[in-house]
Image (spheres, grey):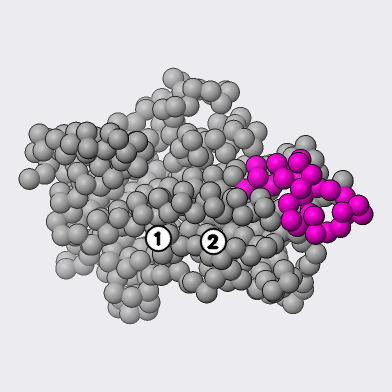
């Protein structure tokens, strides 16, 4: 029985999770991960991730990485409050102040668990779980030819794969073989900054964040302040932007930290009249100044199925971070696709010896698995994309936030996680809560 040959493009969480799950197959599957970075680099990449029981945590469990995950996860990072620019709280979720009452071994008892882990740590765990040599570093994909040949930036090529899986992010080169659709600018710009050793360098900010997250809003503006596992705090200033090139036309250099702080915090600046502690979160930043334009794929995006090629994660359903579901959805993609591929191989669809049945049977079995994955993934991703798009519009494009949208956005989250039959009851309960708290009119 021969081994199907699979190429995964991208060694992010989705690509590495898929590779890990396939490496655990009881029947041999040849997997190669091609990554553009020249070597493993576990620098801080993005913020802290909130993994959910039925998606992200289920994937960690399926990959047999539970103990490794627990060693880096934080169960005291679930404090969260949503405030206005004056730091008035509209929604507050108290966090756990100790890890002692949280499960430290075994994957059971997770129904109420939403531990946090830094994105860089998750990537390290997944990367180090793979067999030596499975990831080929320094292979920056330039394009995928129509016959499935991989063409890299240095001119080298790789061919002969039964399946190419694009886990190569927002500007996926693999997706370009499936669709002409390019990411759409969401209308939101963002600047990331960092406060090292925040407990010592910004004690008041550290106290307010309380090892978790603070999300502050005013019309067309957002400030997210997020505790990281290494003691630093990430600060994200988000704002409406007229076009995706805002960083070139904003009147200051958004890669220069001092210049950016001055522009954002000056009188008349986007955050000039915000609460002193929220302003301090930006003032105390001494590292990182990374401007970004937030993009998304259209809600309900699909492509015409093509044999031998598919995509997952951001490459399949790019969205803004306003719902906090992106990495959970990507890890769920990996579990779904891996299971279907392994099932196909075990049933003999994708694993019959080429000498006996020919290459066609290998590809046929994989193609059936990929078709089933895509048909399962599209509506699942579409539901999350709709929630994310609705939340983005509510938080960033509605007047008088957060007061005007706090009940509606909370109801969106509740409805997303509950059966439709109870939606009228849960929605009424959410609105009643905020009304009696005096937080909505």
What is the secondary structure assignment of the residue under circle 1? loop
Depth order, front residue of 281/136: 136
Q: Residue at x 11, y 38 (%)?
A: 435
Q: Residue at x 61, y 54 (%)?
A: 371
Using the rendered image of the protein, determine whether residue 405 is visible from the camera's viewpoint.
yes
Tell me residue 282's x, y (percent): 31, 56
Mark 2 burial class by Cα count in 10 Å: few <14, some 14-19, many 20+? many
Depth order, front residue of 87/375: 375
Q: Quick one: label 1 or label 2, which is nearer the N terminus?
A: 1
Name the residue tied to disc 2.
315
Residue 299's tag is 1
The question of residue 118 being in magenta is answered with no
| Left/right of residue 59 with respect to residue 136 in the rendered view | left
Q: Mark 1 against mark 2, which lies toward the viewer?
A: 1
Report the span colored magenta.
Answer: 337-365
Residue 129's tag is none
Using the rendered image of the protein, determine whether residue 200 is visible from the camera's viewpoint.
no
Mark 1 burial class by Cα count in 10 Å: few <14, some 14-19, many 20+? some
Give the quadrant of residue 145. Answer: bottom right
Give the quadrant of residue 367. Answer: bottom right
Depth order, front residue of 334/295: 334
Q: Are marks 1 and 2 in contact (CB under 8 Å)?
A: no
Tell me residue 224's x, y (percent): 32, 51
Using the image, determine if residue 164 lies above or below residue 19: below
Tell me residue 121's x, y (percent): 56, 44
Tell me residue 237's x, y (percent): 32, 59
Q: Residue at x 50, y 62 (%)?
A: 302
C-alpha gap between disc 1 and disc 2: 13 Å
What is the secondary structure assignment of the residue under circle 2? helix
Farthest residue to the top: give it. 101
Using the image, determine if residue 288 lies above or below residue 74: below
């Amino acid at each position: 029985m021969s081994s199907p040959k699979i190429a995964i493009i991208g060694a992010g969480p989705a690509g590495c999770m898929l590779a890990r799950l396939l490496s655990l197959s009881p029947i041999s599957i040849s997997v190669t991960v091609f990554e553009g970075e020249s070597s493993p680099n576990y620098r801080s990449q993005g913020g802290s991730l909130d993994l959910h029981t039925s998606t992200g945590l289920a994937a960690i469990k399926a990959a047999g990485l539970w103990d490794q995950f627990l060693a880096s996860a934080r169960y005291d990072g679930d404090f969260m409050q949503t405030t206005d620019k004056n730091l008035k709280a509209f929604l507050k979720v108290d966090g756990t102040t100790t890890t002692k009452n949280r499960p430290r071994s075994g994957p059971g008892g997770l129904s109420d668990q939403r531990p946090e882990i830094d994105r860089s740590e998750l990537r390290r765990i997944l990367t180090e779980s793979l067999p030596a040599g499975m990831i080929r570093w320094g292979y920056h994909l330039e394009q995928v030819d129509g016959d499935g040949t991989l063409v890299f930036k240095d001119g080298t090529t790789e061919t002969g794969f039964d399946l190419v899986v694009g886990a190569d992010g927002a500007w996926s080169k693999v997706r370009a073989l499936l669709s002409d659709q390019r990411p759409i600018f969401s209308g939101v710009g963002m600047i990331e900054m960092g406060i090292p050793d925040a407990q010592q360098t910004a004690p008041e900010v550290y106290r307010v964040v309380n090892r978790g997250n603070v999300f502050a809003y005013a019309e067309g503006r957002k400030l997210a302040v997020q505790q990281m596992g290494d003691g630093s705090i990430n600060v994200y200033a988000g704002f409406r932007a007229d076009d995706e090139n805002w960083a070139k036309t904003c009147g200051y250099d958004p890669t220069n930290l001092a210049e950016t702080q001055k522009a954002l915090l000056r009188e008349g600046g986007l955050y000039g009249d915000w609460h002193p502690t929220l302003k301090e979160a930006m003032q105390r930043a001494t590292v990182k100044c990374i401007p970004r334009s937030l993009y998304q794929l259209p809600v309900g995006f699909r492509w015409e199925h093509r044999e031998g090629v598919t995509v997952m994660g951001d490459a399949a359903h790019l969205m803004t971070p306003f719902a906090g579901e992106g990495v959970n959805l990507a890890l769920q993609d990996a579990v779904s696709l891996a299971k279907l591929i392994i099932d196909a191989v075990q049933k003999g669809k994708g694993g019959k010896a080429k000498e006996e049945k020919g290459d066609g049977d290998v590809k046929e079995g994989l193609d059936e698995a990929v078709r089933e994955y895509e048909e399962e993934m599209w509506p699942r991703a579409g539901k999350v994309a709709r929630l994310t798009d609705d939340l983005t519009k509510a938080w960033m494009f509605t007047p008088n936030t957060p007061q005007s949208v706090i009940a509606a956005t909370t109801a969106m989250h509740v409805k997303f996680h509950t059966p439709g039959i109870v939606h009228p009851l849960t929605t009424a309960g959410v609105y009643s809560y905020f009304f009696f708290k005096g937080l909505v009119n």
